[in-house]
Image (cartoon, grey):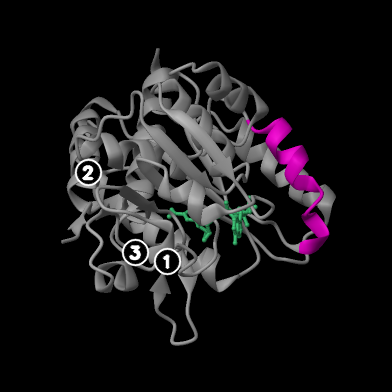
Amino acid sequence: MMELLKGKPVSDMIREAVMAQIKPEEGIVPRLAIVRVGEKPEDLAYEKSAAKKLTELGIDVVGCAMTDDITPEDFMKTFSEINGDKSIDGILVMRPLPGHLKEYEEWLALHIDPDKDVDGISPINLAGVMRGNPEAFAPCTAQAVIEILKGHGIQLQGKNVVLIGRSMVIGRPLSMLLLKENATVTICHTKTVDLPKICKAADIVIAAAGHAKLVTPEYVRDGQILVDVGINVGEDGNLTGDIDLCEIEKAGINVSATPVPGGIGIVTTSVLAKNVCLSKTRHMM
Ligand code: NAD
């Protein structure tokens, strides 16, 4: 039997806590700027969905769109204005930036005000995450994995956690968050030898590879917890994760698993809201 670890109850809990902190009558209205260059459909879709979910909570969302022919100089100037705007509590930048601005992602990470860096791209925040500093903003998706596990009452201390993926957005910061929870962490990647064997030995497998249905029945065993971070758009336009839950279920293996959609994605947006709110609270102190 498969137990689904859905994102909604965890997301609802986070949203309730966020809503309790927003008080328009006292002027407590956090403001998020979403910075986007160009009109990539996936950026537009994410921006629209995040803006809707955060606005519902009472967060003020400001869209800061630039055309994809913007020069690096104008991009840096516009971003610096947003970054310096005292009325803005949090900044989310849609990445990757278009090709001609790709090399400015490093500039962005170095220049974003760490106090407004609600998606944890600044080296100041990432160093804080490495040190286990609870004040540091971690990338929202990495944080969402911890929230969904804890929200479903799953203990991390002493657990063997296998993480597939070593990106700066998910794998690496998540490995540090898991370490902070006293898990024993194995980070796997494209050069890992015998991934199925390593996964099978774990208590918890977290897939963040961006490779549809990578984790098949030969990777898993009864009693494991599977977290699927992957978002892969199939030829039919449907979303699939990195874990082939259908085949795992057909093989009769009993696991607890986060679904895609309806798992990590929905919690990620709530973590973003939580971070914007936290930033507002800190700015008021
Ligand atoms: P990335 O391409 O930067 O990194 C992928 C990592 O997975 C790399 O470290 C790579 O070594 C590893 N990998 C890839 N294929 C592998 C394989 N076959 N075997 C072993 N390791 C493999 O991707 P990313 O930005 O970290 O995103 C990963 C996935 O998470 C993507 O599907 C992305 O869409 C998704 N994502 C989800 C959310 C969310 O909110 N749910 C947010 C951001 C990204």
**Which residue position holds label 3?**
260
Q: Earlier in the sequence, mark 1 or mark 2?
A: 2
- Picture quadrant of ligand 1: bottom right
On whether ligand 1 comes within 8 Å of the CB at mark 3, the answer is yes
Q: Quadrant of residue 259?
A: bottom left
Magenta region: which residues? 99-112
**Which residue position holds label 2?**
10
CA separation in Å, label 1 and label 3: 15 Å
The verdict on residue 111 being magenta is yes
User: Looking at the image, which residue is at 31% across and 37% down?
Assistant: 147
For residue 109, the mark is: none
Identity of the residue furthest to the top in this view: 285
Quick one: label 1, few (<14), some, or many (20+) residues within 10 Å? some
User: Looking at the image, which residue is at 24% across and 46% down?
Assistant: 11
Residue 105: image location, x then y, percent? 73, 46
Which one is closest to the eye, mark 1 or mark 2?
A: 1
Element carrying mark 2: helix
Amino acid on which disc 1 is placed:
Thr
Apparent side of residue 67 relative to residue 24 in the rendered image (left or right): right
For residue 216, the mark is: 1
**The C terminus is located in which quarter?**
top left
Element carrying mark 3: loop
